[in-house]
Amino acid sequence: DSGVTQTPKHLITATGQRVTLRCSPRSGDLSVYWYQQSLDQGLQFLIQYYNGEERAKGNILERFSAQQFPDLHSELNLSSLELGDSALYFCASSAPGLAGGRDEQFFGPGTRLTVL
Amino acid sequence: AQKITQTQPGMFVQEKEAVTLDCTYDTSDPSYGLFWYKQPSSGEMIFLIYQGSYDQQNATEGRYSLNFQKARKSANLVISASQLGDSAMYFCAMRGYTGANSKLTFGKGITLSVRP
């Protein structure tokens, strides 16, 4: 158990709908990262938040948005869903930078999204 | 830009033997970190080992060691004394520490199957 929690574990929805994925980082971790894993694209970084502020952005579609709340949990909102959005969505967290830059990311169990 | 290359399509190893999983990388960052993650069939991403670009010695974590050859830009994972539970997908990843390269970039992964 990494200490990162994600809900829900599975989500099945229809095209055009909107869903919210939730993530709670490990206790003490300030950074939250979102990744999408699909068969054709592999593991892709979407977005990072650090202590409530957006820190880095990756291949995140405009239909997707995220935020990190004062209690450090994060939500990823996916709207106008398409069949191609079906994927495993991971949240990861890391501690503030340690000496030498070691800041491994600990991943949650993922949310498997199926768009029908 | 960062790039991770994992070209081995699938690996097989006999239980109790050692196996090497290959990873090459490319980056323009002078300082970076290299990571290996394991993804069993259950889907979670498990952190295995970290190597900093300025670390003088190869990283070791239990049965996992990283064969880091900076000049060749390779970071191969060595698993000693393979166990049946090592059967999984293995991902090599890297991150720089400046700007857009501060995110984790993953390779496509290698499937490892351990035979009894």
Image (cartoon, rainbow, N blue to C red):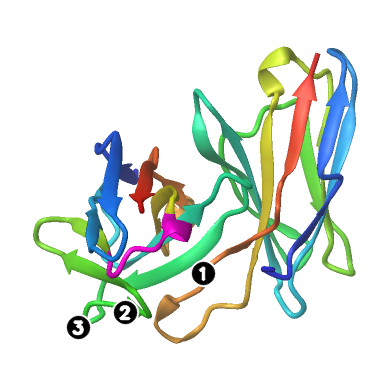
Q: Is residue A14 left or right of residue B98?
A: right
Q: Horizontal and vertical percent for residue B19?
A: 24, 58
Residue at the image position 74 percent from the left and 60 percent from the top? A53
Residue at the image position 19 percent from the left and 67 percent from the top? B68
Provide the residue designation for mark 3: B56
Provide the residue designation for mark 2: B60
The answer to whether one can see residue B87 in this image is: yes
Which one is closest to the eye, mark 2 or mark 3?
2
Provide the residue designation for mark 1: A104
Residue at the image position 61 percent from the left and 78 percent from the top? A96
**Subunit of mark 3?**
B
Q: Nearer the viewer, residue A94 or A2?
A: A2
Taking the magenta stretch, the answer to whether it contains residue A25 is no
Quadrant of residue A86 in the image?
Answer: top right
Residue type highlighted by circle 2: Thr
**Subunit of mark 1?**
A
Residue type highlighted by circle 3: Gln
Q: Which mark is residue A11?
A: none
Determine the secondary structure under disc 1: loop
Classify B95 as above or below A97. above
Residue type highlighted by circle 1: Glu
